[in-house]
Image: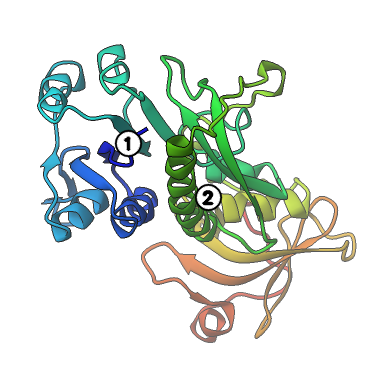
């Protein structure tokens, strides 16, 4: 097999950037980059480039942003005659006409150990479910949702303080490392596709704000997973005197007294200690609606927050 592969890279968010940077550092021939169209962001709702588009532009790469992938994308890609398409969180399901265009097909960098967590939010759901391990899978894309053959995997331990944001960064870096390894093994003829075991499938559907409210009648470790898994979006919250209160940096502790779940047991320099169904939760940072995120120690200096108050009541 020739060492030279004409590669089209497809990705949109920050997660995909390390993979693109790894390809360039490895001196791969990236002939074009495909990212989703610019969209309004921020309070001013101004059009903003995707992180992948920004990275590609800095490397002076050709960037495509087709609005209609079933027509525009197929036509635009054909011009580049790619040998391989590499996908990392592009955000759209690719039509068969794209999948069959390159001679080596399309490889996807998926942020889970397939067949676990097929879908759009595998990093968040791994934390929400309390998993202790996750990883990245390099897979051959087929017409299903993350159903293609597994080519390569890399494992990663989930730390007890990992949020979706911190785990996101770790897995993005691992994805960049694995795609280079996959390309080297592809050239050497050492990639052996393995079918996914459908008996082990779990799904990771998109998140919504419906997942945000905290139920203090749940176990402390489950609430900790909720807070960390929804950080940085859509963020877990409770209420204090009718106002939304977002919580960050949780630690599940052993049972503390017989207080009603949601009761503040302590509010001091160490944080906010809150009663749960089977223990308590120590929260180190909070954010009241309309205010900035801050340590509990700073928050309580100017606001009435004390033991005995009940959150979410």
Residue at 22% from the left image edge and 30% from the top image edge: 82
Among numbered discs 1 and 2, the one appearing first in the sequence: 1
Question: Taking 75 as reference, is 286 left or right?
Answer: right
Q: Residue 5 location, x and y as percent?
A: 28, 37
Q: CA distance from mark 1 to mark 2?
A: 44 Å
The reply to whether residue 208 is visible in this rendering is no
Q: Which residue is mark 2?
A: 230
Q: Residues within 10 Å of mark 1 (few under 14, many from 20)?
A: few
In depth, the one of 184 and 166 nearer the eye is 184
Q: Which residue is mark 1?
A: 2
Q: Secondary structure at mark 1?
A: loop
Residue at 62% from the left image edge and 27% from the top image edge: 115
Q: Is residue 178 above or below residue 302?
A: above
Question: Taking 106 as reference, is 116 left or right?
Answer: right
> Total number of numbered labels?
2
Q: Residue 277 location, x and y as percent?
A: 81, 50
In depth, the one of 64 and 273 nearer the eye is 64
């Amino acid at each position: 097999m020739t060492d030279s592969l004409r590669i089209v890279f497809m990705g949109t968010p920050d997660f995909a950037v390390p993979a693109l940077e790894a390809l360039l550092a490895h001196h791969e021939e990236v002939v074009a980059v495909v990212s989703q169209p610019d969209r309004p962001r921020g309070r001013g709702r101004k059009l903003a480039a995707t992180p992948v588009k920004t990275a590609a532009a800095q490397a002076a790469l050709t960037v495509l942003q087709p609005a209609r992938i079933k027509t525009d994308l197929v036509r635009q890609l054909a011009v580049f005659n790619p040998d391989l398409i590499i996908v990392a969180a592009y955000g759209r399901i690719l039509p068969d006409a794209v999948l069959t265009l390159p001679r080596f097909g399309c490889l996807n960098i998926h942020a889970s150990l397939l067949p676990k967590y097929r879908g759009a939010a595998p990093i968040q759901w791994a934390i929400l479910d309390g998993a202790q391990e996750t990883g990245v899978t390099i897979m051959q894309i087929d017409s299903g949702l993350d159903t293609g053959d597994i080519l390569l995997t890399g494992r990663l331990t989930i730390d007890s303080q990992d949020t979706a944001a911190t785990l996101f960064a770790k897995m993005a870096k691992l994805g960049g490392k694995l795609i280079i390894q996959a390309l080297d093994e592809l050239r050497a003829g050492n990639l052996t596709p393995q079918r996914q075991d459908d008996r082990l499938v779990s799904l990771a559907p998109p998140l919504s704000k419906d997942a945000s409210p905290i139920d203090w009648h749940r176990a402390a470790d489950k609430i900790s997973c909720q807070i960390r898994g929804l950080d940085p979006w859509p963020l877990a919250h409770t209420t204090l005197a009718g106002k939304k209160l977002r919580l960050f940096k949780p630690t599940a502790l052993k049972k503390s007294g017989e207080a009603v779940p949601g009761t503040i047991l302590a509010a001091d320099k160490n944080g906010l200690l809150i009663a749960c169904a089977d223990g308590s939760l120590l929260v180190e940072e909070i954010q009241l609606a309309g205010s900035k995120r801050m340590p509990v120690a700073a928050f309580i200096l100017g606001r009435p927050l004390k033991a005995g108050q009940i959150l979410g009541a």
